[in-house]
Image (tube, grey):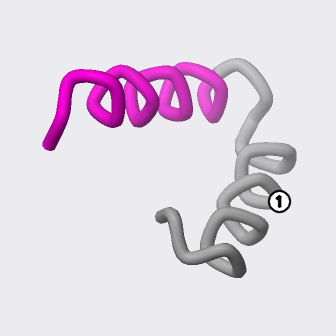
Amino acid sequence: MTKSSEAFHKAISLYEVQNKQTEADMLRDKLQEIGIW
């Protein structure tokens, strides 16, 4: 994994914890649609 994507995943993990996963799940679904996740 590149450093930028590693940082990105850490940010998402932090975001999940802070937002009790609802918004993070929506974001992850969008990323899966584009094929990033």
In the image, taking residue 7 as reference, residue 28 lies left or right, namely right
Residue 20 quadrant: top right
Residue 25 quadrant: bottom right
Marker count (numbered): 1
Q: Is residue 32 above or below residue 22?
A: below
Query: How packed is label 1: few (under 14 Cα within 10 Å), some, or many (20 or more)?
Result: few
Residue 31 is situated, as x and y percent measured from the top left of the image, at 66, 63
Q: Is residue 18 above or below residue 20?
A: above
Q: Amino acid at mark 1?
A: Met
Residue 22 is situated, as x and y percent measured from the top left of the image, at 83, 49
* Nearer to the camera, 19 or 12: 12
In the image, taking residue 30 as reference, residue 4 lies left or right, namely left
For the N terminus, the quadrant is top left
Q: Is residue 11 above or below residue 37?
A: above
Residue under the image location 83 percent in, 59 percent down? 26
Find the magenta span and give its range. Answer: 1-17
Q: Secondary structure at mark 1?
A: helix
> Does 9 appear in magenta?
yes
Magenta part mainly helix, strand or loop? helix
Residue 3 is situated, as x and y percent measured from the top left of the image, at 21, 23
Q: Which residue is mark 1?
A: 26
> Does 7 appear in magenta?
yes
Residue 10 is situated, as x and y percent measured from the top left of the image, at 39, 25
Residue under the image location 66 percent in, 60 percent down? 28
In the image, taking residue 1 as reference, residue 27 lies left or right, namely right
